[in-house]
Image (spheres, rainbow, N blue to C red):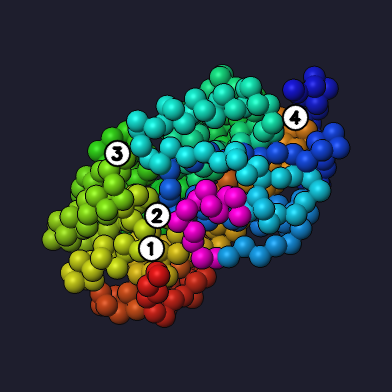
Amino acid sequence: MFPVSSVLAQENREFPTTPVTHQGKKWRIGYLEGGNYPDYEVILKSTVKGLVNLGWIQKLEIPDRYEPNHEEFWKTLAKNVKSDYIEFVPDAFFTSNFDKSLRRETKNRVIERLNSGKDIDLMIAMGTWAGQDLANSEHSVFTVVASCSDPIGSGIVKSAEDSGFDFLHAKVDPERYERQVRLFHELIGFKKLGIVYENSKEGRTFGGVDAVEKVAKEKGFEVVSCFAPFNDVSPQQAKDGVLACHNDLVSKVDAIYVTVHRGITLYSLPRLMAPLYAKNIPSFSMLGSNEVRHGVLMSIAQAEFKYVGQFHAEVIAKIFNGAKPRLVKQTWSDPLKIAINLETARRIGYDPPVDVLAAADEIYETIEVAK
């Protein structure tokens, strides 16, 4: 799969991102996700836009509105994308629905397809579960892991410099959540920070707990944890768990870091944020400014998704141009631009300093309600 001359040359030159066919045919792309999480669709959309920017796909309209049925979105994407170089294979969509009992079955189906079908050239593995299930020696199909909180800590890649498998690439930003928490502390100066996550190794990874605890030691603030189930529960149970935690935390902390959790969606945010508004608790979204638009006080600006999508698109383009995934740079840092919601600030009695507003890349005057 990897010509010797190509492998030897990669360390000495940068591979192009210009569109090329696969020996006269289109490159065929498949998709695996751990479950239905909104961030996955956002990252996929931004990656497609990145491929448009690079000339691999003709310009197309991609609706900003979130499609809860990810498989339906994938099929729509496969139908509407026009390209001489790549195609998104309609029946190459796989999900484990965040159900541990389905996960092994889904993984086996994907591996079987990759090995026996031999009709998929590259897999997009979205999220920690998907990355873990394809980061192994059971196949050798190009795999790009996206939207993973901690690829190193979750065992997907060996290190920031080495994925561990010739066919594997994962975006690594080991200090991303540390930067977020430092910024939040610098702006708010809290003494006790609340976080919600599932009490499991995966839950700690999704919640960036190690990063939060590291910054807490540096800055001298206390971390107050509350556990809410993430996997093997219904979406409503996941939401109820987070709400119970928020109701509990608001009397114990003076700020909350809104982590990545299946119970936190744009649709559930009004209920989840209500206890914080009532007790004047500042909040910071781990996920990004889309949650700020819908009521979280602040986060990193949404432009991050544009940049990370472009990063993944360039990685895919380099791989299709002959780059060995293992040797393509994995480290990437999001631009530290602030997003803030002034209506949320008003509700909790927070008066943003002038320098904060001056540094803000996105300012929202109202709280949008998802429909």
Mark 2 or mark 1: which is in front? 1
- Give the magenta range: 64-76
Image spot of residue 74 (x, y percent): 58, 50
| Contact, mark 4 vs mark 1 (Cβ under 8 Å) | no
Q: Which mark is residue 232?
A: 3
Q: Is residue 249 visible?
A: no
Q: What is the crowding at mark 4: few (fewer than 14 residues within 10 Å), some, or many (at least 20)?
A: few
Is residue 300 placed above or below 241 in the rendered structure?
Answer: below
Q: CA distance from mark 1 to mark 3?
A: 21 Å
Q: What is the crowding at mark 2: few (fewer than 14 residues within 10 Å), some, or many (at least 20)?
A: many
Q: Which mark is residue 286?
A: 2
- Disc 1: which residue: 266
Q: What is the crowding at mark 3: few (fewer than 14 residues within 10 Å), some, or many (at least 20)?
A: few
Q: What is the crowding at mark 1: few (fewer than 14 residues within 10 Å), some, or many (at least 20)?
A: many
Q: CA distance from mark 2 to mark 3?
A: 23 Å
* Label 3 vs 4, first from the N-terminus: 4
